[in-house]
Amino acid sequence: MAKLLIATHNLGKLKEFAEFFMGTPFELVSLSDLGIDLDVDETGTTYAENATLKATTYAGLSGLSTLADDSGLEVDGLGGEPGVRSARYAGEDASDDDRIAFLLQKLNNVAREQWTARFRCVIALAWPDSPIELYEGQCEGIITDRPRGAKGFGYDPLFYLPELGKTMAELPFDEKNRISHRGRAAMKVVEELKERKWHW
């Protein structure tokens, strides 16, 4: 069984990717499994640049095929912020609660009809001796005025899905994975690998 490194320290992401790749002939390993504690500086200006930077760096360190993603929340009334700075929007050491509070503060003087938003994700795959591959997914929604739900992480409790009547953090795990930006990007990866009969 081929090993595939999931290049994140985020336990929520690791759990999601384990679900996405269930039933595939890949043994998923994490940075922690390999004793890698390096944090890559996300100096890119796009999700693709940051995902590529992480995938290539960790592939070089581990010698393994590596999957990395970069994702963010884009709020229309804030000109697309926080975007690629989503994790650092409220400061480098901010908690999820800090980020949520900061985002709501930024929206204080923004008309509610401009609280439309999307989650966007780009996955980069670094295979041995092959060019980087990129896959994108996004999910449209609306920012709520208070957090709801405890099942997600990051901005999930603020991200309301009108067609489901729930925030991302109120969805069962399998339902979130099916409709989320990361889930949509990951399913593109899985489908592409199936087309190749799992070879690269």
Image (cartoon, rainbow, N blue to C red):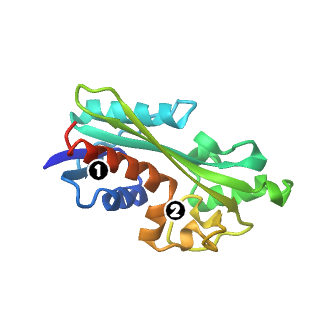
**In the picture, residue 132 is in which quadrant?**
top left
Say the numbered circle drawn on residue 91: none
Q: Nearer the viewer, residue 183 or 148?
A: 183
Q: Secondary structure at mark 2?
A: loop
In the figure, 114 relative to 129: above or below? below
**Which quadrant holds the C terminus?**
top left
Q: Position of residue 54 (x, y in %)?
A: 40, 35
Marks 1,2: beta carbons within 8 A:
no
Q: Position of residue 174 (x, y in %)?
A: 41, 69
Camera-side mark, 1 or 2: 2
Disc nearer the start of the sequence (1/2): 1
Q: Residue type at mark 2?
A: Phe
- Classify 10 Å Cα crowding around label 1: few (below 14), some (14-19), many (20 and above): few
**In the picture, residue 37 is in which quadrant?**
top left
In the figure, 155 relative to 93: above or below? below
> As drawn, which residue projects farthest toward the left?
1
Q: Residue at left 52%, top 72%? A: 171
Residue 35 visible, this angle: no
- Could you tell me how far apart the alpha carbons at marks 1 and 2 are, in whole angstroms? 20 Å
Residue 135 visible, this angle: yes
Q: Position of residue 48 (x, y in %)?
A: 49, 34
Q: Which residue is mark 2?
A: 153
Q: Residue at left 19%, top 46%? A: 3
Say the numbered circle drawn on residue 32: 1
